[in-house]
Image (tube, rainbow, N blue to C red):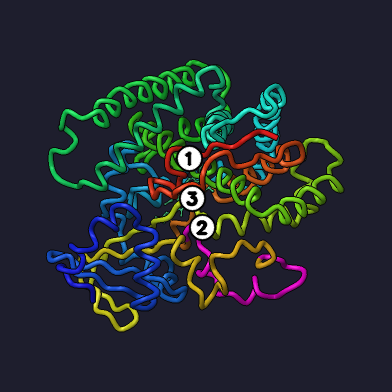
Amino acid sequence: MISPGRLLLHTPRIMRDPLSFMVAMTRQHGDVVAADFGDFRAFIVNHPDWIEHVLVKNHRNYSKQTVQFTTFSEVTGNGLLNSDGDFWRRQRRIVQPAFHRKTLTDLATIMTDAADRTAARWRTQPGAIVDIEHEMLLLSLPVICESLFGADIRARAAELVEAVTHALDRVMFRAQLPIAGAERLPLAVNRRFEQSMKVLEKWIAEMIDGRRAESVARTDLLGILLSATDEDGRPLPDVVIRDEVMTLIVAGYETVASGLTWIWYLLDQHPYSAQWLREELSDVLHGRTPTLADLPHLPRLKMIVDESFRLYPPSWLVSRQAVAADRIAGHAIEPGALVIISPWVMHRNAAFWPDPEQFDPLRFDLAKTDKPKTRPRYSYIPFGGGPRLCIGNHFALLETQLVLATLAQQFAPTLAQKRPHVAAMVTVRPKNGLQMQIN
Ligand code: HEM
C-alpha cells in the first residue's frame, strides 16, 4: 500500500507524467497497486483477469462516478460515455444501430475522401513542416460530423477543432484541480471554455433544427436520435440528443486523431516497418485509393495499427468507482474506492508483452504465430471491454486503416523536432503538437 505521505512526495511526478508513474508503480508493487489517499483508496489494476473482473464479470459493481467522467460531463452532459444504469442501457440500445458493421460500410468513402483531401493539400506543399496532430484533428472531425450527422463542416473545421480542444482543456484542468469553484477562477482556460461551449452549443442546436426542418427522414445517427422515443414513448428531449451528439464528437474524433498521430511518429522511427507497409500498399493498391474490400488484403496495415494502439493507446485511462465491497487479488475494495485501469500501463506489462517498449507489429501476426489467440483477451484493451466497450471501435479501426492506407502510399512524413513528450490529456497527445516534414 502506498501511504498518503509517499503519495504526497510523488505528487509532482503524478501531475507531470502519470503514465510513467503508473508503469513504475506496477513494476515495483505488482499487478494490483493500492494507494491510500486518506479519505479514499485507489487501486491500479494491471492484470487481464482482474481487468476482466472489473469491466465484465462484476461490471455492475463499478460505476462511472469518478473525477474522469464527472469532469467530462461538463462538456458531454449525461451522454453515453458518462451515464450509468438503466439510462445508459437505453441510450446504448438507441445509438448502437448507427455503428453496425453494415452501416459502417457506407461510411468508408467519407473517410477516404477526407484522406484524399488531405493528400491533395499536402501535395501542394512538399517539404513543408506541419503539426501532424493538427492535420489529423482537421481530418477526423469532418469525418465524424459527416458520418454520424450528415453535416459538412469542412469550411469551419479549424474553428470547431479549436472549440473542442478548448472544451477538453478545461476537462483536464478540472480533473487535475478537482476543487469546488476552480471553474469560476478568472483564468484563460475557463474563459476559453465558456466561449467554446457557446460555439459548440449553437452549432449542435442549428444542426438539430436543420434536420428537423427536413421533409425526408435520414437513417444516420442524428436521424436515429430524432426518431427515437423514451420509455414513455415520447421523443427524446433536445438535451438528451445534444448530450449524445456532443459525446460522440468528443469521444470519436480526438481519439482517432491521436492514434493516427502516433502512427506517423512510429513509422518515422521504424523505417523498416514503414517500408514493409509501403510494399504491401503498393502491391495491393497500385497507388489507388483503398476501399473497404481491400482491407482483408492488407494484413500489415492492420498489424501496424494494432501495435501502434498497443504502444500509444489514445485512451490511457478507464476509471471506475466501486459501488459495494469487493475483493481484487486479495485486496479489500471498499465502497467508493477508485479503480484505475490504464491501457497504456497494461500494454507495457512484460508478463504479457515481452520487451514491451519495442515496436513490433509482428506481435499481431495471425498467420505466423498463435500469440494473438493465446494472449489473454484483456491484456489488450485500447477500446476498453465488457458492456462499456467503445461503441466506435469498428468505426475507429476502419477510419485509421483507410486514412493510413491512403496517405502512406504517397507520403512518408519525417520528424522535424526533438523526440516528443507524451502528455496524458483526455487522450494521449504529443506535448505541443508534433512537427513533421511532409515528404
Ligand atoms: C482510436 C480511437 C478510439 C479509442 C482508442 C477509443 C477508446 C475508448 C475506450 C477505452 C472506451 C471505454 C471507456 C470506459 O470504459 O470507461 C470508449 C468508450 C466510448 N467510445 Fe471510444 N475510442 C475511440 C474511438 C471512438 C469513436 C470513433 C467513437 C464514436 C464515433 C467513440 C465513441 C465512444 C463512446 C460513445 C464510448 C462510451 C460507450 C459506452 O460506455 O457505452 N470512440 N472508447
- Crowd band around label 3 with a 10 angstrom C-alpha radius: few (<14), some (14–19), many (20+): many
At 21% from the left and 30% from the top, the residue drawn is 187
Which of the labelled discs sits on residue 314, or is there none? 3
**Which amino acid, mark 1?**
Glu
Q: What element carries label 3?
A: loop
Of badges 3 and 2, nearer the viewer stands 3
* Towards the viewer: 27 or 345: 27
For mark 2, what is the residue?
382
Q: Element at badge 2?
A: loop
Query: Of callouts 3 and 2, which one flags the residue occurring earlier in the amino acid sequence?
Result: 3
- Residue 332 picture location, percent across and down: 24, 78
Residue 419 sits above or below residue 111 on the image: below
Residue at 12% x, 64% y: name it.
Answer: 39
Q: How far apart are marks 2 and 1 (CA)?
A: 14 Å
Which residue position holds label 1?
254
Q: 432 or 93: which is nearer to us?
A: 432
Q: What stretch is highlighted in magenta?
A: 364-384
Q: Is mark 1 on a helix, strand or loop?
A: helix
* Residue 235 seen in the current view: no
Q: Was residue 233 drawn as part of the magenta stretch in this picture?
A: no
Which three-letter amino acid code belongs to the residue tagged 3? Pro
Q: Which quadrant holds residue 406? A: top right
Q: How far apart are the two marked residues, 3 and 2, measured between alpha carbons? A: 7 Å
Residue 366 belongs to magenta span: yes
